[in-house]
Image (tube, rainbow, N blue to C red):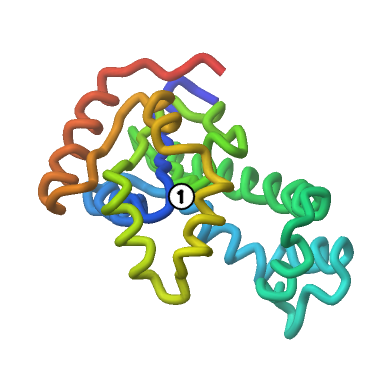
Amino acid sequence: MSDKRPFVLCLTGSLGMGKSTAAKFFVDAGVPVHDSDAAVHALYEGEAVPLVERAFPGSTSDGKIDRTKLGMMVLNDAAALARLEAIVHPLVGAARAKFLAAAEARGAPVVVFDVPLLFETGAHCDCDAVVVVSAPPEIQRRRALERPGMTAEKFIALLAKQMPDAEKRRRADFIIDNSQSFDQTRAQIRDILQSVAKMPHRQR
């Protein structure tokens, strides 16, 4: 890739921290954002369907992956989950590479990779800098429990699968404090974009 490649800013944050809001504000600021969750949704209705059905017979219906059925097949089964990730992660990586090549062709100076499990999956190795969205635990819990279908038990179980917020913040190049107003979050994003404009790409 040439020296003109975009600066890759990776965005992550634990459940309920407001990462999706921050991603939207990057889009509003004119930065192309690749959403890993959206990529998985698209794959579950396309390219991944035959591969997942072969590995997990009965996990698809109407030409799409049935997330509920598949979820039951990998629930509390580390080996099954690892098998699924071995199928899905390379496909998401390929979609991300295609997105990056298109952004480079358009001359975008910065792109954002929105990756919920950035550190947990090792995807931070592909970043020039990492932004972690954070908020105090009480705000995080309140926001998470406002989501449809979320329960206190589910919240605790999901958090247990994620790297602790304190560890994410320790590894971050930038931290967005998302506990206050939208305007303050936008201001922090503007400051980050000004900073990365002067930062070198990481050697990879």
How dense is the environment of label 1, judged by Cα within 10 Å: few (below 14), some, or many (20 and up)?
A: many
Nearest the eye: 47 or 163 = 163
Q: Is residue 29 above or below residue 20?
A: above
Mark yes or no: residue 3 visible: yes
Nearest the eye: 16 or 19 = 16
Q: Is residue 61 above or below residue 171?
A: below
Three-letter code, disc 1: His
Position of residue 149 measured from the top left corner of the image (x, y, whole percent): 47, 75
Q: Which residue is mark 1?
A: 34
Residue at image point 45% right, 42% down? 113
- Is 124 on the left-hand or right-hand side of 76? left
- Is 122 on the left-hand or right-hand side of 194? right
Position of residue 163 measured from the top left corner of the image (x, y, whole percent): 51, 38
In the picture, the quarter occupied by the C terminus is top right
Nearest the eye: 33 or 155 = 155
Position of residue 89 measured from the top left corner of the image (x, y, whole percent): 68, 47
Q: Quadrant of residue 58?
A: bottom right
Position of residue 83 measured from the top left corner of the image (x, y, whole percent): 81, 51
